[in-house]
Image: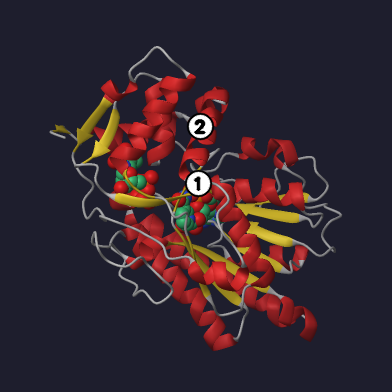
Amino acid sequence: MTGLGDLGRASDSSIESERMILVTGGCGFIGSNFILDWLATHTEPVVNVDLLTYAANPETLASVSVDKRYAFERADICDTAAMKAIFAKYLPRAVIHFAAESHVDRSIHGPMDFVRTNVLGTGSLLEAARAHWKSLGDDAAAQFRFVHVSTDEVFGTLGANDPKFSEHSRYEPNSPYSASKAGSDHLARAYFHTYGMPVMVTNCSNNYGPRQFPEKLIPLMIVNAIAGKPLPIYGDGMQIRDWLYVSDHCSAIRRVLESGAPGELYLIGGDAEMPNRDVVHTICSLLAKHRPGTDYTKQITHVTDRPGHDRRYAIDFSKIERELGWRPSENFATGIEKTVLWYLQNAEWVAHVQSGEYKTWIEKNYKERSATPA
Ligand code: NAD
Ligand code: TYD
């Protein structure tokens, strides 16, 4: 475990003895949005535990690195001893677990990284959390929370007329990514059922918004369009995802943390099912509006499909709406326009994440995909 001075305060932090939350994967897309929102709306401190893999961008949190309520620990969630030391040092009252390998295409190229981080890493973190939880007094133990952040992809794929995923859907993961997340969900569930640890699992649909690494569909299409590069749609582009603006995911997690019932699963969605083709065309129209002079649709190419590509995801989020009073506040039209504007206004951030590793990945993922008819 390493404290990185300019990324946030670490070992000598005076926040160690206060009531605080522990976030894993806080330098990634959703985790960084969560921490920025948290510090903007709460007084309670947060410690961010992140290994800083390719998906991390500590620059994203530069604005809070000097905030007295923020501490950073560079550590691997698979390292149980390091996790136990972090729990002993900060005594968090809750954990929000985001850290994961998160990209389906990378899981197809290298599944074992996903098994290691998502399954073993979650197991190791749960073990460290359990040791900490057992050491708490009765009141603090009863109030302790572990929120395991997961994905709708664990439920597999839907046909066009199937009902949406709900908390009663069967786990049927199809990719190494979703299978490894399913494994982590089962471990989280087992820690509630076996040990009584107050664990809750959230399964959310596809997120988009500021600060998403441009290997995922929406940021990749925006940055490629701006750079005059091809917009590679896999297969026929009629695969459907439900899209949720990232700050709405963060507000749902806060709601689960505050009021969710231990042992429960909560599905979170955006009520915004859309085929990939429509998502890409929407991005092209918004770029034409805010950066006129180019017909971005001319850059669209259909390329070889993803193996085992799930056809449709859709979320029935009536449980979290009914029980915890949560609903998304953005719709796709408002969220995607904010997102396109963010990428237009943050060219420097984009340039910094398009490092050597990024170029290697883009080369690896797209070089084998020949253009196919639409
Ligand atoms: P991301 O890939 O952008 O970020 C992951 C973060 O975890 C990075 O900062 C990385 O450095 C860190 N990390 C990876 N391995 C680690 C390890 N061994 N130890 C410590 N830190 C490590 O991911 P994201 O898109 O922000 O997703 C966060 C979580 O939300 C994941 O668990 C993902 O499965 C889940 N989720 C994501 C989406 C989505 O659309 N992005 C939707 C639903 C659920
Ligand atoms: P992605 O953002 O990788 O999320 P997930 O696979 O977790 O849903 O992909 C979203 C959809 O976009 C998915 O159906 C695959 C498709 N896609 C493309 O068509 N082209 C691309 O270059 C990428 C990255 C994704």
Q: Is mark 1 within 8 Å of ligand 1?
A: no
Dot label at residue 353: 2
Q: Residue 151: where, in percent of width, then height?
A: 44, 61
Residue 138, by quadrant, is bottom right
Number of marks? 2
Left or right, residue 63 beside residue 278: right
**Frontmost residue, 230 versus 270:** 270
Marks 1 and 2: which is nearer the front?
A: 1
Label 1: state its secondary structure: loop
Left or right, residue 133 beside residue 366: right
Write down the residue under mark 1.
Answer: 331
Q: Residue 372: where, in percent of width, then height?
A: 14, 34
Left or right, residue 59 beside residue 44: left
Quarter the N terminus occupies: bottom right
Quarter the C terminus occupies: top left
Q: Around disc 2, counting alpha carbons within 10 Å, would you say few (fewer than 14), some (14 to 19), or many (20 or more)? A: some
Please say if the residues under marks 1 and 2 sit with CB atoms less than 8 Å apart. no
Mark sitting earlier along the chain (1/2): 1
Residue lying at 43% horizontally and 56% vertically, measured from the top left: 205
Establish if 67 lies above or below 96: above
Task: Name the amino acid type tagged 1.
Answer: Asn
**Colouring of the image:** secondary structure
